[in-house]
Image (cartoon, rainbow, N blue to C red):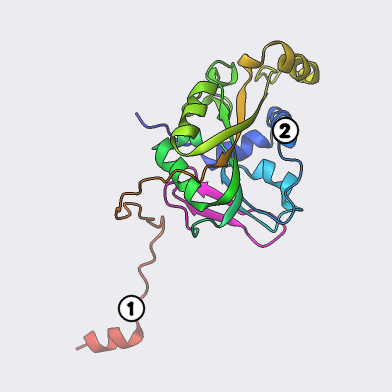
């Protein structure tokens, strides 16, 4: 059974909640330990990465937010020209080697074909381009709880993620973890968040809520590409039928 995307409304609602803001801070802190700044680079966020893209956007040449069709999309950034596109993650509307960095959040765990998605990321990344994937940890508590977006889709182990990266011509690099506090809305759990994050990273890293892995595009081995016709078609929700013109009505009159 294919994993079903979390709806865009549920994602926005989660990140506007207190628990969601705490989760964002935890994951953002872990991301900053790998990517401090991205001066004059092109950054693509795939999935629902907008809570994390603001951290990097000021330094980049440009930043895109690509959101899967099965999830839905929202305008981003709110107070500027939109950088959002609704896409199929196996057929990104970008030229080859056009992006320097890719950040995948709420993305890979919902992919219909993870290998095809990763091959497409490989295609659009420039030589030496880097990728960060944030996925639910299959051993963590967050993957078992369905009231957060991290409890949906297909969770991964570190070994599974590393194997997928190597299979699709990426070299795994820096790794880290986040979300060591429980996904509870209780005030006590949220107050203990800082201590649990600090001790969890040292004492029980295998049980983090998410695994975060950076990888670099590998160039010395080609990927076989099979020619195929796109099977993806966007169907508008509202298809206006139009109003017959006055001339048409006059022609039909007796």
Whole-percent x and y of residue 158?
55, 22
Q: Please tell me whether residue 84 belongs to the stretch shown in magenta.
A: yes
* Residue at figure coordinates x 49%, y 46% from the top left: 122
* Residue at figure coordinates x 31%, y 52% from the top left: 231
Depth check: give the residue in front, 57 or 146.
Answer: 57
Disc nearer the start of the sequence (2/1): 2
Q: Secondary structure at mark 1?
A: loop
**Can you tell which mark lies on residue 21?**
2
User: What range is drawn magenta here?
Assistant: 65-93
Whole-percent x and y of residue 84?
58, 55
Depth check: give the residue in front, 17 or 41.
Answer: 41
Which residue is identified by label 1? Answer: 244
Quarter of the image for residue 21 reads top right
Whole-percent x and y of residue 40?
72, 57
Q: Against 130, is 80 above or below?
A: below
Q: Against 126, is 136 above or below?
A: above
Q: Against 117, is 207 above or below?
A: above
Depth check: give the residue in front, 68 or 202.
Answer: 202
Q: Is residue 63 visible?
A: yes
Q: Gap in Å between the C-alphas at discs 2 and 1? A: 51 Å
Q: In the shown orientation, is residue 29 left or right of residue 228?
A: right
* Residue at figure coordinates x 58%, y 54% from the top left: 99
Quarter of the image for residue 167 reads top left
- Camera-nearest label, 2 or 1: 2
Q: Against 132, is 229 above or below?
A: below
């Amino acid at each position: 059974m294919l994993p079903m995307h979390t709806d865009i409304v549920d994602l926005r609602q989660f990140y506007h909640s207190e628990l969601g803001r705490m989760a964002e801070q935890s994951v953002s802190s872990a991301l900053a330990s790998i990517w401090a700044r991205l001066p004059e680079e092109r950054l693509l966020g795939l999935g629902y990465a907008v809570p994390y893209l603001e951290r990097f956007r000021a330094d980049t040449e440009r930043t895109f937010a690509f959101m899967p069709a099965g999830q839905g999309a929202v305008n981003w950034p709110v107070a500027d020209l939109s950088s959002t596109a609704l896409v199929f993650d196996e057929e990104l509307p970008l030229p080859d080697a056009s992006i320097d960095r890719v950040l995948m959040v709420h993305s890979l765990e919902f992919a219909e074909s993870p290998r095809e998605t990763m091959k497409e990321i490989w295609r659009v990344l420039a030589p030496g381009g880097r990728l960060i994937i944030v996925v639910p940890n299959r051993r963590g508590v967050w993957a078992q709880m369905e009231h957060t977006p991290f409890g949906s889709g297909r969770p991964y182990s570190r070994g599974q993620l590393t194997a997928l990266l190597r299979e699709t011509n990426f070299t795994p690099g820096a790794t880290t973890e986040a979300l060591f506090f429980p996904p509870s809305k209780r005030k006590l759990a949220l107050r203990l968040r800082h201590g649990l994050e600090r001790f969890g990273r040292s004492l029980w890293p295998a049980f983090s809520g998410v695994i975060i892995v950076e990888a670099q595009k590998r160039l010395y081995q080609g990927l076989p590409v099979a020619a195929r016709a796109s099977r993806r078609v966007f169907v508008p929700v509202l298809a206006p039928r139009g109003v017959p013109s006055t001339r048409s009505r006059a022609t039909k009159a007796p």
